[in-house]
Amino acid sequence: MISVSKLLCGLDAESDGLRYDAAADSSRDQITEQKQQRPVVVWNLTKQCNLYCSHCYAAADTETAPGELSTAEGKHLLDDLADFGIPVVLFSGGEPLVRDDLEELVAYAADRGIRPVLSTNGTLLTEERAESLREAGLQYAGVSVDGLPERNDEFRGEEGAFDAAVRGIENSLDAGLKTGLRYTITEANAPDLPDVVDLLHDVGVDRFCFYHLDYGGRGADISNLDLSPADTREAVRTVCDLTREYHEQGEEIETLLVGNYADAGFLVEYAREELGDTQADRIHRYLEANGGDPTGERIADVDYQGNVHLTQFWQGYSLGNVRDRPFSELWSDETNPLLSGLRDRDDRLTGKCAGCGYQSICRGGSRLRALSAGGPFDPDPKCYLTEAERSGPADAPGGSGDAHAD
Amino acid sequence: MGTFCTEALADDMDPEDRTRVRDAPRSATGREWEVFVREDADGALQHVGSVTAGDADAAHDRASDLFGWTARDVWLCPADETRRYTAHTLGEPAGGESA
Ligand code: SF4
């Protein structure tokens, strides 16, 4: 996750020590000089959802899955996560609000010192639920909207879903919850992006997380709807431009990019062009401290049946199941060659990633998309940097000597 | 270190201390296959997680994509045919009701 607003508009003001972790849905300041030690855990509470989105990585549908973790099992899971030092649990789905024990689990996480945050389609976020979630200790709600009304409703498989999501956002804001947008960028909705930001900013949203499509679940079936590399680059440039425009007008919106660390290299290039070398070098140092693609390290997923995954999108492979073995053990077991290989991937990355000048801030991009292209250490097929960009910068800052940003 | 701990525990452990993990379905989108790999001819067969796939050949393809760079042998066991006994418990399951 890359905080565009902090990097392009906030670094001057921030002397040091901003936190930067893998959860776009945690509303904490996200940049730090130190790499996060424990992963943010996404917990897909249920397979059930009231919508049927074409890009759903969890392949959710209208029924619960057999054998979903019970409330009691969930609390044991949260105990283990708390003891292990997990900073954030992102309650997700399916649609987590279809579970009526959501508040109980949120409260339990908060009591155990974990920061509970929520990912929702917003349509079930009534005044009452928003209120009860805030009382339970919820820290943030990320609501998915994927385009202007018509496009969003088509994507989500239900007419009126856009308006229902906006009502949910309003209820959440009214309850005093920090609330942000989740927007998965595809070829179909990329042109809507600035207008959606405008529209939701008017509603009161000031945090916007843009996800690149990752190829898992039903997302795999629509990989052909993904943006071309050139259009991806354009969409990312749009996010950078609009962030700066808002900030220049005194509207300090927060914008984040998730799911494609080629964005890190692009951001440095963008800053060099638009803001000059000093700022570009500073941004490079911050991104390097953050550590690039988080797979296997700073993000993890537990699905509704207790299977542990490398990321929330990587549902086709599981490290093990929390009914057999605690999450903390599965995550610490580096005898698993894939887990240890991903953690220690620098010399394993192949193809254009092997000699890339931005490898230290990207780490090969999405390992799941790499898998769709061949293997876990192949290049991310969605890398859009040019050959010239990948071969520079000649003397990348932060690689030696002055490792501390000012 | 993991191996030593497991062995030490196994020496001391009464089989009664282990309970069978209930046969809850492990996937709602296909069949789940436990994956075991051996890295060298004289190495141990090691459990490395599970993949979701329609049949054994597809599971082998998936496991090969993930572990082909390191594995010599790959074994696949249908998770619903695998009985797991563990000293770890995760609390009460939901029983007949939906969770
Ligand atoms: S070539 Fe690889 S490491 Fe370099 S920016 Fe692209 S995906 Fe990242």
Image (cartoon, helix red, strand yellow):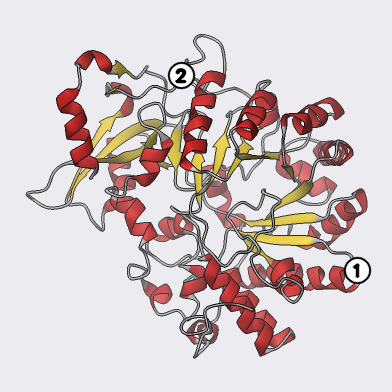
Q: Secondary structure under badge 1?
A: loop
Foreground pick, A332 / A128: A332
Left or right, A367 with respect to A336, comes to right
On the image, numbered disc 1 is attached to which residue?
A: A250
Dot 2, how many residues are within 10 Å of its Cα: few (below 14), some (14-19), or many (20+)? some
Give the numbered dot on residue A101: none
Which residue corresponds to the image point at 57% horizontal and 18% vertical from the top-left? B99
Question: Is the distance from the Cβ of mark 1 to the nearest ligand 1 atom less than 8 Å?
Answer: no
Tell me the amino acid under the disc marked 2.
Answer: Gly
Q: CA distance from mark 2 to mark 1?
A: 51 Å
- Marks 2/1 same chain: no
Q: Which quadrant, please, contains the N terminus of chain A?
A: bottom right
To which quarter of the image does residue B59 belong? top left
Estimate the x, y position of residue A117 in percent, counting from the top left.
Answer: 67, 41
Tell me the amino acid under the disc marked 1.
Answer: Gly
Give the numbered dot on residue B91: 2
In the image, residue A66 sits, relative to residue A52, either above or below, namely above
Estimate the x, y position of residue A14 in percent, counting from the top left.
Answer: 72, 71
To which quarter of the image does residue A344 belong? bottom left
Question: Is the distance from the Cβ of mark 2 to the nearest ligand 1 atom less than 8 Å?
Answer: no
Estimate the x, y position of residue B80 in percent, counting from the top left.
Answer: 33, 23
Residue A376 shows in the view: no
Q: Residue furthest left?
A: B42
Dot 1, how many residues are within 10 Å of its Cα: few (below 14), some (14-19), or many (20+)? few
